[in-house]
């Protein structure tokens, strides 16, 4: 069974030979493992570990494509820069980290209408056609399920105004937030049409929407339904109209939003972050017959590089969540370079052994 065949069946909750397999990594990890001699020059994670899936992230949704980032300040380890979204962010020079939010030019509707909205046009410069074409051909050659991947509307909005102004806007000017979400959903669909008409359709869509933090979503379920869900329905319906299932990624605690995300049409949820309060077994029990679950294995078990700890984590979950043929082995976050290469190989070996249906 090829990865594509397996993933197609998993997304339909149909019998397969084993659970699915995929993973995300921090950029530092590839470099470290390569320096240690584990990864040959030019080798991909997909080839190294036999993943069932391949993605292509090929859209640039920065508002002003012509803006040259301006360095505001820097020190030995970090730099602060103004970007084409009007955001001033502090980043680490040597490590992958979430940037620190310093300031945003967009704080209210007038800023959005003046500084951002006029730039949000379906310009072909926003699309890396070559990268998509190459990834699509490689996935077909290797028998992998191929996803177009990119952000959805929540992940488009906070880079221009920050989480605080966006969330205050949900209370003080909800029509502004709804307008932003609708504008970005239209832009995403127009760019997808432009890409797919030229290069062909993917097997599925993989949207990234980090809508939660530790213990809670960024918004109430009511606000999600009012302000974000209409845009999700639109982008997901567009995928389904063309026979493409939809995976939605969300870090953080999003369980209160999940019934509404399912109503919006998602086919799978990834990444099910344990340290944020998500519980793979509980979510499988409640929603496993409705959607595919990808992830939910506590990456902190891998941090230990202790096989007994990894065994305990996998044995507590895989035999249960594989029921229903709708689970894909994946950590609950990206793999950092502190995880040994051999540790990760063992994680796959053990997880797939437990997830075999034969």
Image: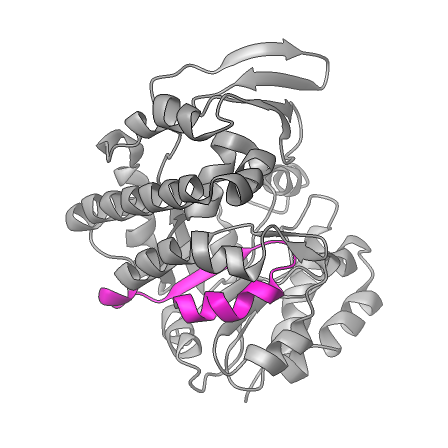
Is residue 78 shown left or right of residue 186?
A: right
Q: Please name the residue shown 62% across and 50% down the image.
A: 334
Residue 250 lies in magenta, yes or no?
Answer: yes
Quadrant of the image containing the N terminus: bottom left
x%, y% of residue 201? 23, 57
Does residue 266 appear in the picture of this structure?
A: no
x%, y% of residue 89? 59, 24
Q: Is residue 42 above or below residue 77?
A: below
Does residue 179 appear in the picture of this structure?
A: yes
Q: Quadrant of residue 2?
A: bottom left
Q: Is residue 98 above or below residue 314?
A: above
According to the image, what is the colour scheme of the structure? one colour
x%, y% of residue 301? 78, 60
Give the residues drawn in magenta, as a range. 240-264
Q: Quadrant of residue 350?
A: bottom right
Residue 158 lies in magenta, yes or no?
Answer: no
Quadrant of the image containing the C terminus: bottom right
Q: Please name the residue shown 66% across and 84% down the image.
A: 320
Q: Nearer the viewer, residue 151 or 170?
A: 170
């Amino acid at each position: 069974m090829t990865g594509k065949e397996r993933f197609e069946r998993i997304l339909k909750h149909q019998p397969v030979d084993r659970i699915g397999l995929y993973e995300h990594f921090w950029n530092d990890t590839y470099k470290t493992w390569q320096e240690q001699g584990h990864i040959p020059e030019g080798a991909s994670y997909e080839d190294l570990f036999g993943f069932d899936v391949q993605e292509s992230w090929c859209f640039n949704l920065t508002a002003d494509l012509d803006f040259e980032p301006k360095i505001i300040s820097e020190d030995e380890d970090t730099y602060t820069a103004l970007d084409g979204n009007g955001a001033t962010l502090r980043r680490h020079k040597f490590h992958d980290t979430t940037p620190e939010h310093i300031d945003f030019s967009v704080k209210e509707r007038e800023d959005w209408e003046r500084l951002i909205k006029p730039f949000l046009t379906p310009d072909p410069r926003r699309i890396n056609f070559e990268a998509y074409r190459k990834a699509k051909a490689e996935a077909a050659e290797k028998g992998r399920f191929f996803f177009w991947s990119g952000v959805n509307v929540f992940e488009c909005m906070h880079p221009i105004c920050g989480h605080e102004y966006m969330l205050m806007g949900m209370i003080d000017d909800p029509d502004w937030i709804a307008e932003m979400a609708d504008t970005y959903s239209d832009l995403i669909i127009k760019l997808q049409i432009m890409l797919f008409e030229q290069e062909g359709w993917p097997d599925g869509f993989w949207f990234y929407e980090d809508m939660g933090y530790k213990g809670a979503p960024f918004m109430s379920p009511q606000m999600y339904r009012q302000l974000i869900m209409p845009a999700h329905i639109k982008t997901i319906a567009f995928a389904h109209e063309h026979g493409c299932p939809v995976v939605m990624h969300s870090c953080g605690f999003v369980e209160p939003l999940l019934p509404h995300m399912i109503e919006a049409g998602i086919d799978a949820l990834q990444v099910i972050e344990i340290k944020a309060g998500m519980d793979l077994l509980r979510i499988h029990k409640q929603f496993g017959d409705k959607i595919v679950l990808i992830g939910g294995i506590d990456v902190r078990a891998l941090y230990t590089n202790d096989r007994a700890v990894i065994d305990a984590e996998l044995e507590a979950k895989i035999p249960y969540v594989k029921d229903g043929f709708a689970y894909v082995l994946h950590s609950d976050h990206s793999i950092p370079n502190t995880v040994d290469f051999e540790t990760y190989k063992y994680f796959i070996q053990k997880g797939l052994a437990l997830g075999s249906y034969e």
